[in-house]
Image: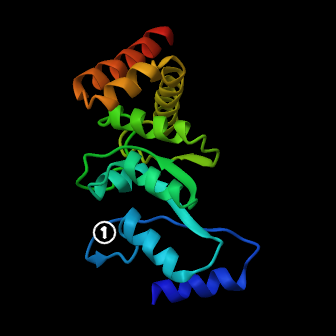
Amino acid sequence: MSIEAVRELAQRHPDLRFAIEYKPREPRNRMTFSSAARTLLAIEEMDVPNVGILLDFGHSLYGLESPADAAQMIMARDKLYAIDVNDNFRGWDDDMVVGSIHLVETFEFFHTLAQANWQGVWQLDQFPFRENAVEAARAGIEVIRTIWHALQILDTDALADAQARQDALAAQRIARAALLSAQLDGR
C-alpha cells in the first residue's frame, strides 16, 4: 500500500522531488521503509524518477546500519536527496547533538559524502530535552565545522593505503589525527 501511494503521489506531481525518510521502527509499529536497502528496493519498484531518500544519520544507527555504507549504497543509485545529522545510542531515535557518541562514524559519514562530492541538503536534526536548544544547535554546528576542517587536513593517501592493506588500526590513527588536529586548530 505504501509503495503504491508514494508512486501515485510522485506520478501526479512529476515536477516535485519526494524524499522518503526511512526509520527502523516506532513504538508498536512496523515500518515499510525501515532501512536503506528496503527503501531503495521500494523506490525501484515504484519506477518513478522523482522519489529518493532523506538519510537520517540517527535512523541509520538505530537500524544497526553503517551510515557511511548506507550513504554509498543510496548515492550509487543517485537517490540521496538530503541528510539529517544527529546522534543516538543505537537503541532509539534520541536526536542527540551531532558526534555525541559516534564521532568517528560521523567523520566517516561526512568523508563518504565528500569523496562522492555530494552537494545535497544537509539538516541538523537534534531534539535537546534538557539542554538549551540554541546551545545544542551551536554544539552540533561546531562538531560539523570541526569535521569539515578535519576532512581538509585528512591524509587521504595514507588512509587509502591503510584501507588497501586492510589495516584498521592505521586507518583509525589517521582519522583520529585529523579529528584531533582539527579540534586543536579550532581553539
Name the spot of residue 15 as percent of width and height, x first.
77, 73
* Amino acid beneath label 1: Arg
Viewer-proximal residue, 100 or 57?
57
Q: Residue at x 33, y 31 (%)?
A: 164
* Number of numbered discs visible in the structure rendering: 1
- The correct choice, above or below, for 9 with respect to 55 in the image is below
Left or right of residue 112, residue 50 in this image: right
Q: Count residues near mark 1 (Cα–Cα under 10 Å), then give few for <14, some for 14-19, many for 20+.
A: some
Q: Secondary structure at mark 1?
A: strand
Rendering colour mode: rainbow
- The correct choice, above or below, for 46 with respect to 157 in the image is below
Name the spot of residue 79 as percent of width and height, x first.
56, 62
- The correct choice, above or below, for 109 with respect to 184 in the image is below
Name the spot of residue 12 as percent of width and height, x first.
71, 85
Q: Residue at x 48, y 64 (%)?
A: 21
Quarter containing the N terminus? bottom left
Viewer-proximal residue, 133 or 175?
175
Residue 34, by quadrant, is bottom left
- The correct choice, above or below, for 96 with respect to 23 in the image is above
Name the spot of residue 90 as percent of width and height, x first.
25, 50
Q: Residue at x 62, y 78 (%)?
A: 48
Seen from this angle, which residue lies furthest right?
Answer: 15
Left or right of residue 34, residue 13 in this image: right
Q: Which residue bears the numbered disc 1? A: 25
